[in-house]
DNA sequence: GGGCGGGCGGGAG
DNA sequence: ACTCCCGCCCGCC
């Protein structure tokens, strides 16, 4: 029986009006859609609801679209069907590594988890920040491991770039899909992991310019512009501040909590 | 320089 | 509500 036919039946019509309160099509309010798109290091399955992107998996980490849809149903309790075309803005976001204008459906998450993900989203492509930085920035400087846990539950990896959150000793750290994929993602956006590693071997985790007196995380766009003769490395931020440097306003290196 | 415990939020009973 | 227990950690011995 169609909606039009129901409308000729007073009872069915009344029920239909109760059951369909919103302007968008009933189907799209229940059924989420999925697409397969090219990501920076291979294909991605991307599911989205009426609110935005809700679930992302690298195609290589699931057996196929069927398993992806089943996993989505388990997590979100609603069906998933193929979309005719990708969500607007999805492909540009993947191309640029910037997802700030893309909409996400993060309703299933706690406030803490959302705060962590929104902060991770602010890390520019090609740069990294430590877990402790995310914790400080969201106002919970001690919640470092909780940040790791929250990132581990990121339902929309790659798009919300939890792979840009790394260990403070310069190593990439763990990743939902393994640290190898984390490294690949970082290399794909031209993070110089070899340089970071070389600096870490010399216990350098912050880089400053002796002309500007500004100290940055090594991957900060401003740190990369410092010419070699003026580049100065620091083991920790306290050391830099004691030498008269101030934290960069763009990458905002945080004071170690135990200092 | 590797191991250890502090530390916090979340989730399962 | 109140345990536990765990985690993409951190910095200090």
Image (cartoon, coloured by chain):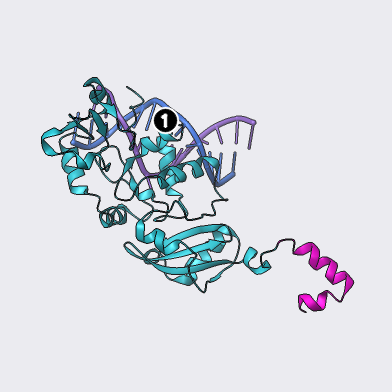
Chain colours: A cyan, B blue, C purple
Secondary element type, mark 1: loop
Q: Residue at point 46% right, 71% down?
A: A65
Q: Residue at point 67% right, 68% down?
A: A25
Q: Is residue A199 left or right of residue A106?
A: left
Q: Position of residue A180 (x, y in %)?
A: 28, 55
Q: Is residue A117 left or right of residue A239?
A: right
Q: Is residue A129 left or right of residue A209?
A: right
Q: Position of residue A128 (x, y in %)?
A: 31, 44
Q: Residue at point 50% right, 65% down?
A: A87
Task: Decide whether residue A3 is among the magenta residues.
Answer: yes
Q: Which residue is mark 1?
A: A141
* Closer-to-camera residue (C8/A50): A50
Q: Position of residue A40 (x, y in %)?
A: 33, 61
- Residue A240 in the image: above or below residue A175: above
The quarter of the picture where the N terminus of chain A appears is bottom right
Q: Residue at point 85% right, 66% down?
A: A14
Q: Residues within 10 Å of mark 1 (few under 14, many from 20)?
A: some
Q: Is residue A120 left or right of residue C2?
A: left
Task: Decide whether residue A213 is among the magenta residues.
Answer: no
The quarter of the picture where the C terminus of chain A appears is top left
Magenta stretch: give its range. Answer: A1-22
């Amino acid at each position: 029986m169609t909606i039009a036919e129901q409308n000729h039946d007073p009872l069915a019509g009344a029920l239909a009006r109760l059951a369909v309160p919103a302007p968008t099509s009933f189907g799209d309010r229940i059924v989420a859609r999925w697409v397969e798109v090219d990501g920076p290091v291979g294909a991605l399955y991307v599911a989205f609801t009426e609110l935005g992107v809700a679930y992302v998996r690298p195609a290589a980490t699931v057996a196929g679209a069927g398993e992806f849809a089943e996993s989505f149903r388990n997590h979100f309790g609603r069906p998933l069907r193929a979309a005719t075309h990708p969500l607007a803005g999805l492909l540009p976001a993947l191309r640029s590594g910037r997802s700030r204008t893309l909409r996400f459906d993060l309703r299933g998450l706690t406030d803490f988890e959302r705060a962590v993900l929104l902060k991770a989203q602010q890390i520019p492509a090609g740069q990294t920040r430590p877990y402790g930085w995310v914790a400080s920035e969201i106002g919970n400087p001690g919640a470092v491991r909780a940040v790791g846990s929250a990132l581990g539950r990121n339902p929309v990896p790659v798009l919300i770039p939890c792979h840009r959150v790394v260990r403070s000793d310069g190593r990439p750290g763990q990743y939902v899909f393994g640290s190898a994929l984390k490294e690949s993602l970082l290399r794909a956006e031209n993070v110089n992991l070899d340089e970071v590693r070389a600096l870490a071997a010399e216990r350098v985790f912050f880089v400053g310019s002796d002309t500007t007196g500004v100290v940055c995380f090594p991957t900060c766009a401003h740190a990369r512009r410092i010419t070699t003769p003026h580049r100065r490395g620091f083991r920790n931020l306290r050391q830099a501040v004691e030498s008269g440097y101030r934290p960069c306003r763009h990458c905002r290196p945080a004071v170690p909590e135990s200092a």
